[in-house]
Image: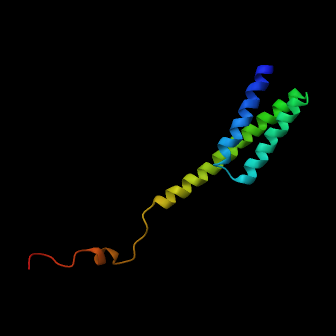
């Protein structure tokens, strides 16, 4: 049981920082607070409740990070699309002379 608590505590420490960069601050902070509250409960001797809340917080952090990452991938895909050209733009950039003079 102590190993489980140790593993979840370590996971709780690293997971929020991993996804905090990639996720919406408000939702990640809420999940991080949930992880912290669970870890504090473990420290206060409420191991069962603490582990449960910590695990839920880690799960929420992963979910919110995945949602935000999906949104960012969509945005980057749109940004990578070629810009629409104005009608006749290809004609303006084409060479003006053809053949030898």
Q: Position of residue 11 (x, y in %)?
A: 71, 32
Quarter of the image for the C terminus: give it. bottom left
Seen at 46% across and 59% down, the residue is 80
Horizontal relation, residue 40 to residue 27: left or right: right
Judging from the image, the colouring scheme is rainbow
Q: Position of residue 57 (x, y in %)?
A: 77, 39
Horizontal relation, residue 100 to residue 95: left or right: left
Residue 19 vs 11, above or below: the answer is: below
> Can you tell which quarter of the image residue 86 is in?
bottom left
Nearest the camera: 5 or 98?
5
Horizontal relation, residue 85 to residue 44: left or right: left
Q: Position of residue 16 (x, y in %)?
A: 71, 41
Callout count? 0
Quarter of the image for the N terminus: give it. top right
Residue 28 vs 15, above or below: the answer is: below
Q: Position of residue 28 (x, y in %)?
A: 73, 48
Seen at 30% across and 78% down, the residue is 92
> Can you tell which quarter of the image residue 50 is in?
top right
Seen at 87% across and 27% down, the residue is 47
Seen at 80% across and 20% down, the residue is 2
Residue 29 vs 50, above or below: the answer is: below
Nearest the camera: 77 or 50?
50
Nearest the camera: 34 or 9?
9
């Amino acid at each position: 049981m102590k190993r489980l608590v140790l593993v979840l505590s370590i996971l709780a420490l690293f997971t929020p920082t991993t996804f905090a960069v990639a996720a919406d601050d408000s939702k990640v902070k809420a999940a991080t607070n949930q992880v912290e509250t669970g870890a504090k409960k473990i420290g206060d001797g409420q191991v069962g409740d603490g582990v449960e809340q910590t695990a839920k917080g880690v799960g929420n952090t992963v979910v919110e990070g995945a949602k935000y990452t999906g949104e960012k991938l969509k945005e980057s895909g749109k940004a990578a699309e070629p810009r629409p050209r104005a009608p006749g733009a290809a004609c303006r950039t084409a060479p003006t002379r053809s053949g030898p003079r």
